[in-house]
């Protein structure tokens, strides 16, 4: 049987992935609840809230 070959990732690409993974924002449960409640109050648009909090809109919709 043939094994599938994966493209080799360079050391630079691996380093970039590691940095991105380490610098992701991690929100606590309380932060998540506050963000959702802020959206439910309808004082600002969801887009504005997401921009202010630094999260993508698609993540808010999930």
Image (cartoon, helix red, strand yellow):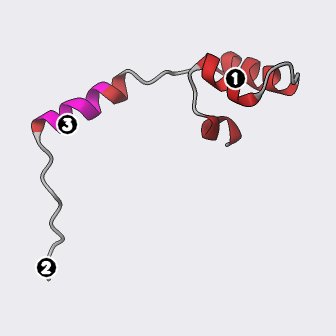
What residue would you read off at disc 2? 2
In depth, the one of 49 and 13 nearer the eye is: 49
Q: Residue lying farthest bottom?
A: 1
Callouts 1 and 3 close, C-beta under 8 Å: no
| For residue 32, side relative to residue 10 (left or right) | right
What residue would you read off at disc 3? 14
User: How far is the residue under mark 2 from the one under mark 1?
Assistant: 51 Å
Earlier-in-chain disc, 2 versus 3:
2
Picture disc at residue 48: 1
Q: Nearer the viewer, mark 1 or mark 3?
A: 1
In depth, the one of 30 and 56 nearer the eye is: 56
Image quadrant where residue 51 sits: top right
Earlier-in-chain disc, 1 versus 3:
3
On the image, the x and y values in percent for residue 14 come to 19, 37
- At x 19%, y 38%, the residue is 13
Earlier-in-chain disc, 2 versus 1:
2
Q: Nearer the viewer, mark 2 or mark 1?
A: 1
| For residue 57, side relative to residue 4 (left or right) | right
On the image, the x and y values in percent for residue 60 come to 67, 35
User: Local crowd at mark 2 within 10 Å, few (<14), some, or many (≥20)?
Assistant: few
| For residue 33, side relative to residue 24 (left or right) | right
In depth, the one of 8 and 56 nearer the eye is: 56
The main secondary structure of the magenta stretch is helix
**Over which residues does the magenta segment extend?**
12-19
Q: Is residue 17 above or below residue 23?
A: below
Please state, as top left, top right, bottom left or bottom right, where the C terminus lies in the image. Answer: top right
Indicate the secondary structure of the residue bearing disc 1.
helix
């Amino acid at each position: 049987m043939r094994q599938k070959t994966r493209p080799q990732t360079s050391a630079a690409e691996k380093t970039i992935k590691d940095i991105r993974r380490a610098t992701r924002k991690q929100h606590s449960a309380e932060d998540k609840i506050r963000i959702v409640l802020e959206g439910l109050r309808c004082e600002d648009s969801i887009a504005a809230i997401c921009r202010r909090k630094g999260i993508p809109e698609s993540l808010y919709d999930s």
